[in-house]
């Protein structure tokens, strides 16, 4: 099923050193006529290096994080402004690994979203529950809590620069993909919740894209994409394998 406004985003996480790029792009042979907006998020120091490769395919550059402040004495941080200045188009925020290992919560994420918006970056905002939260019946409450970080931007038309990625924590990097029923149920819930936040997005005719992430691979991508509420993927492990990633890019 061809869909307008679909995205496939590669989250390379903390993988690949400089020399790996040549190997990756040497084996990377994407299908012609890809129907999705594609971006790759490498580690920060590789952003400018991969840009020429991405330009060749008409793909965009994405970052995995940005600072909660715009500039100044924040040693080791990377501002949304500098990302914009080197051609980055999107930034992933709220990824469960950042929530888990770097204690990022909605208060902090709200500040990061604000920085990204000010720097004209698109925001790929990740939400998703742990297995424990799902088993305890807290799925919807968890998602609503995570979506709260978007509330402050009602008047700022955030929805125009927003992509939401549903990534159940228990499916990330585990090979345990959510069932089609689980994905459909959560995506419908998210669609409904986002429309309540931004009713004008429906009237604008370009509602917020909701991606699925969590063990997407060359085998399961098409059936997930067939779900009407799935507007594409955030892909981790499989995006490091050029052949597998090309198969994922060919879904339609
Ligand atoms: P995975 O990671 O595809 O390796 O499960 C997805 C993600 O964390 O974005």
Image (cartoon, helix red, strand yellow):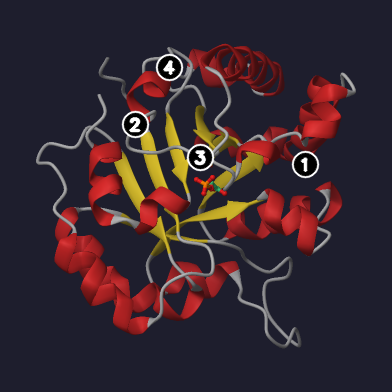
| Tag shown at residue 149 | 1
Q: Quadrant of the C terminus?
A: top left
Looking at the image, residue 1 lies above or below residue 9:
above
Looking at the image, residue 229 lies above or below residue 144:
above
Secondary structure state at the residue bearing disc 1: helix
Q: Which residue is mark 3?
A: 215
Q: Nearer the viewer, mark 4 or mark 1?
A: 1
Instruction: Report, in whole angstroms, how far the alpha carbon at label 2 lies from the one at label 3.
Output: 10 Å
- Closer to the chain start, of discs 4 and 3, is 4
Secondary structure state at the residue bearing disc 2: loop
Q: Is residue 250 left or right of residue 82?
A: left
- Closer to the chain start, of discs 1 and 3, is 1
Q: Nearer the viewer, mark 1 or mark 3?
A: 3
Q: Quadrant of the N terminus?
A: top left
Q: In the rendering, at what x and y percent does residue 78 appear?
A: 61, 76
| Tag shown at residue 219 | 2
Tags 1 and 2 in contact by the CB under 8 Å rule?
Answer: no
Q: Looking at mark 3, is its residue's CB closer than 8 Å to ligand 1?
A: yes
- Closer to the chain start, of discs 4 and 2, is 4
Residue 158 vs residue 39, the one in the foreground: 39
Q: Nearer the viewer, mark 4 or mark 2?
A: 2
Secondary structure state at the residue bearing disc 3: loop
Instruction: Report, in whole angstroms, how far the alpha carbon at label 1 lies from the one at label 3.
Output: 25 Å
| Tag shown at residue 205 | 4
């Amino acid at each position: 099923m061809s869909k307008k406004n679909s995205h496939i985003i590669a989250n390379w996480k903390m993988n690949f050193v400089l020399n790996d790029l040549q190997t990756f792009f040497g084996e990377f042979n994407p299908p012609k006529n890809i129907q999705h907006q594609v971006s790759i998020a490498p580690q920060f120091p590789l952003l400018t290096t991969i840009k020429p490769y991405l330009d060749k395919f008409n793909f965009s550059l994405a970052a995995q994080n940005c600072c909660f402040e715009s500039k100044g004495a924040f040693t080791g941080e990377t501002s949304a402004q500098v990302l914009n200045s080197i051609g980055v188009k999107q930034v992933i925020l709220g990824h469960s690994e950042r929530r888990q290992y770097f204690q990022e919560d909605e208060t902090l994420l709200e500040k990061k979203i604000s920085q990204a918006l000010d720097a004209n970056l698109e925001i790929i905002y990740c939400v998703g529950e742990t297995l424990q939260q799902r088993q305890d019946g807290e799925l919807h409450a968890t998602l609503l809590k995570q979506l709260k970080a978007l509330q402050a931007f009602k008047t700022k038309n955030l929805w125009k620069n927003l992509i939401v990625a549903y990534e159940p924590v228990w499916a990330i990097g585990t090979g345990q993909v959510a069932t089609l029923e689980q994905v459909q149920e959560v995506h419908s819930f998210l669609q409904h919740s986002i429309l309540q936040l931004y009713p004008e997005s429906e009237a604008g005719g370009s509602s917020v894209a909701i991606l699925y992430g969590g063990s997407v691979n060359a085998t399961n991508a098409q059936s997930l994409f067939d779900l009407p509420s799935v507007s594409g993927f955030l892909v981790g492990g499989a995006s490091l394998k050029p052949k597998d990633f090309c198969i994922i890019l060919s879904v339609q």
